[in-house]
């Protein structure tokens, strides 16, 4: 498949034939879509089944249009800096080019943090997450809105696909089963459950100074608020987790235990994704087993300690 030609055709559909003829296209890595930086000003995604088949539910025309509808609403309704969805001259947010769906957003600048963030950046990330969730709680979701639901039990199936030693598998399965049981006991009411980004890890936040900006809403859907928080905490050390939770607005004691369960579910799901990508997960698995799963099963808190 000639993604370069598809990208040029999609750019022409969004920007119009005349203006798209001489733009520059720079292919960049981007998870579950083939992505291009267009003329230094736009971010183009090609949603090909060749790269997004593992998350097909989030890549239908309706689901993509819904993702962009929320991003556009965030940009209008909050002070957050987000990518603006680009529409075609006919007003479409999603186009089809030779059977491949394409979407385009404005390009926003910022730095992806490598390693652990400063305390202020972690607090900023917490405020960002709180703002997104506050918007989701009050936004009037369109009747046509269609995004996946993030079910806790998916972590169990994902864990089954990860290459684990027998002892590690037994420990993690027991911890995941306990976390699923606690999560599913929580009512899916607006107090606990709603529209979430669901993937706000360090690679999906840009920083300008200490200001955090969200990108890549490709996993957004319906889920528990604390699941959304856990995903953002996943790769932080305790000091960073404490700072992010502070920026988020704090956690009640009973919410800490639930967040720890979601933390384990996020980590377990990640093992399947990382191993499928060819990553060596041995060290991460050992860390999760020793520092998170073991104390969780013993009823000991780990999220904010250390």
Image: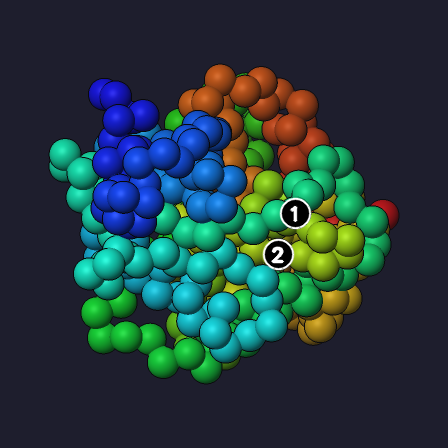
* Residue 295 percent across, percent down from the top left: 71, 45
* Residue 51 percent across, percent down from the top left: 32, 29
Callout 1: helix, strand or loop? loop
Q: What's the CA distance linking mark 1 and mark 2? A: 8 Å
In this rendering, position of residue 110 left or right of residue 306? left
Check if mark 1's residue and mark 2's residue have beta carbons within 8 Å.
yes
Residue at the image point whose x is 57% and y is 34% from the top: 171
* Residue 17 percent across, percent down from the top left: 24, 43
Tell me if residue 305 comes above or below residue 9 in the rendering: below
Give the class, few, some or many, for how many residues have Cα within 10 Å of label 2's Cα (few <14, many ≥20): many
Residue 245 in view (yes/no) = no
Give the class, few, some or many, for how many residues have Cα within 10 Å of label 1's Cα (few <14, many ≥20): some
* Residue 256 percent across, percent down from the top left: 67, 63
Residue at the image point whose x is 46% and y is 82% from the top: 138
Residue 215 in view (yes/no) = yes
Callout 2: helix, strand or loop? strand
The quadrant where residue 62 appears: bottom left
| Mark 1 vs 2, N-terminal side | 1
In this rendering, position of residue 282 left or right of residue 210? left
Residue at the image point whose x is 50% and y is 77% from the top: 77
Residue under numbered circle 2 = 213
The quadrant where residue 119 appears: bottom right
Q: How many marks?
A: 2
Numbered tag placed on residue 110 in the rendering: 1
Q: Please tell me which residue lies in front, 183 or 127.
A: 127
């Amino acid at each position: 498949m000639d993604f370069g030609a598809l990208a040029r055709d999609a750019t022409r559909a969004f920007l119009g034939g005349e203006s798209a003829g001489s733009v520059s296209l720079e292919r960049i890595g981007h998870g579950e879509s083939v992505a291009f930086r267009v003329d230094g000003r736009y971010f183009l995604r090609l949603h090909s089944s060749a790269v997004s088949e593992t998350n097909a539910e989030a890549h239908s025309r309706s689901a993509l249009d819904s993702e962009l509808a929320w991003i556009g609403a965030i940009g209008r309704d909050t002070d957050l800096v987000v990518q603006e969805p680009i529409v075609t001259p006919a007003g479409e947010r999603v186009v089809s080019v030779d059977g491949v769906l394409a979407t385009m957003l404005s390009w926003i600048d910022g730095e992806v943090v490598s390693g652990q963030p400063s305390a202020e950046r972690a607090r900023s990330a917490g405020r960002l997450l709180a703002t997104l969730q506050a918007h989701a709680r009050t936004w009037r979701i369109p009747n046509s809105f269609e995004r996946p639901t993030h079910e806790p039990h998916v972590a169990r199936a994902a864990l089954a696909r990860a290459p684990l030693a027998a002892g590690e598998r037994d420990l993690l399965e027991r911890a995941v089963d306990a976390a699923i049981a606690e999560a599913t006991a929580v009512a899916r009411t607006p107090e606990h459950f709603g529209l979430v980004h669901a993937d706000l890890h360090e690679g999906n936040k840009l920083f300008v100074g200490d200001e955090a900006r969200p990108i890549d809403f490709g996993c957004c859907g319906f889920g528990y608020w604390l699941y959304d928080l856990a995903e953002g905490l996943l790769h932080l050390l305790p000091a960073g987790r404490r700072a992010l939770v502070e920026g988020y607005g704090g956690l009640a004691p009973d919410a800490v235990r639930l967040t720890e369960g979601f933390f384990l579910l996020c980590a377990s799901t990640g093992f399947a994704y990382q191993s499928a990508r060819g990553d060596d997960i041995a060290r991460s698995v050992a860390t999760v087993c020793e520092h998170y799963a073991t104390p969780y099963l013993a009823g000991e808190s780990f999220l904010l300690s250390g």
